[in-house]
Amino acid sequence: DDWSVEKIKRVGADAVKVLTWYRPDADKKVCRAQQDFTQRIGEACAKYDIPYVFELLVYPLAQDAEQTKDYVEMKTKKPELVLASVETFAAPDYGVDIFKLESPLAAADVPGVDGEDATEAQRWFDALGEAAGRPWVMLSAGAGMADFRRILTHAYAAGASGYLAGRAIWLDAFQAFPDWDAIRAGLSGPAVAYMKDLNDLTDTAALPWHRHACFGEGGARLVPADASFRHVYPGFGA
């Protein structure tokens, strides 16, 4: 569609986001093509000094029982495939700055932090954070409000830095379609209250991105940490 990292930078964007539907057990040629594309974008983001936000979602292969024309979370997805996908693109060759990740477990199967099987669920989220190896946030994948909040409690315990969500916030309101008055009421009432609750949870429990262990002791900072950094900060042509 004639976009490029250079054009995205030129129009003043804050970041470049790429969504990749990926299965590490798919045809090797398909995986290689996706990896090559991801790497080219990462190299361009480094060249034009713009953050690279990379989103990963597993999808059904032809032999899988779950098939759909529109995206819905795979209820039978394997957490091993989610982790293997993240491990692949966490390699430095791809230049990812921030991961936007799905829950390793189906949303409805994620227990509360005090619920049955909570310890086992937390192990999967901990493994997700370890595989990412840099700041990461959670996507909602259309989870319900209660399900997504449970997901965030586990993700934040594993070191996630926030969330990027849509349907978890507004989908309930749109169940009233085509009653636009009811939709507006749902968005301005329960949806706003829910988002405030998520933001409060994030402020309390999420790891600030600049304090991620990948930046070392002291966190992300300019080096030198004063106005003299400009003397060693290269231009695009360097």
Image: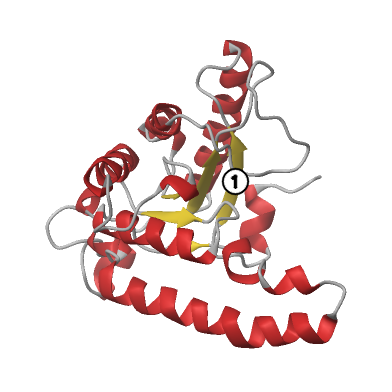
Would residue 170 be seen by someone viewing this image from the given angle? yes
Residue denoted by label 1: 18
Return the residue nearer the eye: 60 or 110: 110
Return the residue nearer the eye: 40 or 139: 139
Q: Is residue 71 left or right of residue 16?
A: right
Q: Position of residue 68 (x, y in %)?
A: 74, 35
Q: Is residue 160 above or below residue 42?
A: below
Amino acid type, mark 1: Val
User: Which residue is pictured at 63% across the width and 27% down the height?
Assistant: 60
Task: Provide the secondary structure element on which disc 1 rests.
Answer: strand
User: Which residue is pictured at 45% across the width and 34% down the height?
Assistant: 94
Q: Is residue 79 left or right of residue 174?
A: left
Q: Residue furthest left?
A: 217
User: Which residue is pictured at 33% across the width and 41% down the height?
Assistant: 128
Tell me which corner region of the image, top left, top right, bottom left or bottom right, holds residue 192.
bottom right
Q: Is residue 215 left or right of residue 38?
A: left
Q: Residue furthest right?
A: 178
Q: Is residue 4 above or below residue 220?
A: above
Q: How is the image coloured?
A: secondary structure
Q: Position of residue 27 (x, y in %)?
A: 61, 12
Tell me which corner region of the image, top left, top right, bottom left or bottom right, holds residue 1.
top right
Q: Position of residue 45 (x, y in %)?
A: 52, 47
Q: Is residue 131 above or below residue 234?
A: above
Would residue 238 be seen by someone viewing this image from the given angle? no
Return the residue nearer the eye: 219 or 227: 219
Q: Position of residue 135 (x, y in %)?
A: 34, 53
Q: Residues within 10 Å of mark 1 (few under 14, many from 20)?
A: some
